[in-house]
Amino acid sequence: ALKRFYQTRFAPVVAKKIVYWPVMLASFSLFGASIYGASKLEYHFDDKDLAFEGSPLYEFNKVDANRFGSETEVIPCEVLTGDFDYTSEINQQKMTALFKDGGLYESNEYYEPGTLNCWYSDFRDFGNLTDASEIFPPNEFYGLLDQFLLTDDGSAFEGSLIFKFDSDMGRERLMSTRSLSVLKVSTSLSDRLNAMDSIRASVDAAGLPDAFPYSPLFLFYDRDSVVRDEAIQILLISLATVFAITLVLIGNIKASAITLLGPCLSVVDMLGMMYFFDIDLNTVSVICLALSVGITIDFSSHITIGFMNSAGTKEERVAETLGHLGPALTHAGASTFLCTAVLVFSTTYVFKIFFKMFMLIICFGMFHGLVLVPIILLLVGPKEYFNEATVLAKSIEIVTVSHASTSQNVTPAIEDDEIDYEESLQQN
């Protein structure tokens, strides 16, 4: 019944100009709107979203956001310095330029005033070095540092200074240090990334050979900063790979390009609908986008290959292709829908995103594969592998050879029967 529907009802309707021109207009209008939506799509992923609905953590985050929410937040940040000569004049000057009051670090726009807890600043205060040009005598540096660490102020930094034994000096020397501070940033992704890049630039400007800022949240900021570029790269590589494989298997550039049209439009439409349906662009949705290329190509490629293997006019080839493959592709889409439909009852963020994204994949994949691609093939589809005359000639040749073979096998049998009959009459 489904085969008859596709071949005798659906295909003839799709082949009418009054139908396929509005369908194409609607498809490419949706494509244009999706491009606009995709351009407005912003990355967003909050670890708080991973709490499932109804859990104590979810309720706490909800109340905290509603009653105590703010457009800004403070994040801890450490400045780590590595293994270099802390006694040298030039390195002491660089440390002073970085950590002095109003220096490179404190003058950063994202620095929260009064939060820098730096051992070197307190060490300079201990040595009464008030002018930025003043330094500790290199040969007295570690002796004064030992005295500083014995004071109440200095003992607070024991956990922030790491020493290692130096055989040339005959004593321990600094191998690594850290200074603590707080940064104030807004909750927007762009401001977070700007804060991370800005504070790194301030530390780099000091010119210390081995110094960098660190915050546990920088791990997530670095991840967030590359997701958009990674998503574009993954999708482009996936689409290019699909085109190369279909070109090898189909052997026709035009047919491969039409096949690629399905997943291309599906991906762009999904990106646009993500904006309009308030689906965040993040690592979860990007995974679904990558999967969408492999899923949606099935609908388009089967239709195109069926069209290339059919003979007759383009209308007949489209009707035959939809009649043979339409039911199977419909069953595939319906079964995938049913398998993922159970996720609608999920209370976790990840499964909610998977449900929404897979619904879009199925809808756009089936629409482009079963409606738009057949229309494109109807209008500009390439020639078939074998034309109707060739197929008919091959069929006649096969029937002729089969008939001749049958005749050769039957004639000797008849002659043998006649000889047996004559011999029996003679004996009687």
Image: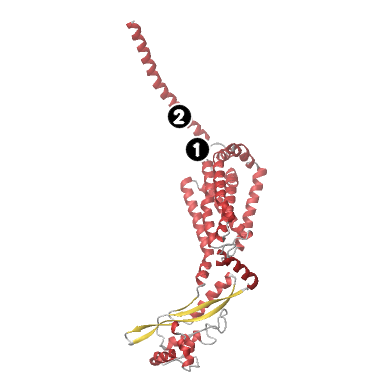
Q: Which sits in the foreground, 358 or 198?
A: 358
Work out whether 310 lies above or below 409.
Answer: below
Q: Is mark 2 on a helix, strand or loop?
A: helix
How many numbered marks, from 0 up? Answer: 2
Judge left or right: residue 367 versus residue 155.
Answer: right
Q: Quadrant of residue 138?
A: bottom left
Q: Which sits in the foreground, 365 or 54?
A: 54
Q: Position of residue 190 (x, y in %)?
A: 58, 70
Badge 1 vs badge 2, beta-carbon distance below 8 Å: no
Residue type, mark 2 in image = Ile
* Res 346 label: none
Q: Earlier in the sequence, mark 1 or mark 2?
A: 1
Could you tell me how far apart the alpha carbons at marks 1 and 2 are, in whole angstroms?
A: 16 Å
Q: Position of residue 367 (x, y in %)?
A: 60, 48
* Res 398 label: 2
Q: Is mark 1 on a helix, strand or loop?
A: loop
Judge left or right: residue 339 versus residue 86.
Answer: right
Res 305 visible:
yes
Indicate the quadrant containing the N terminus: top left, top right, bottom left or bottom right.
top right
Can you identify the residue that label 1 sits on?
Answer: 386
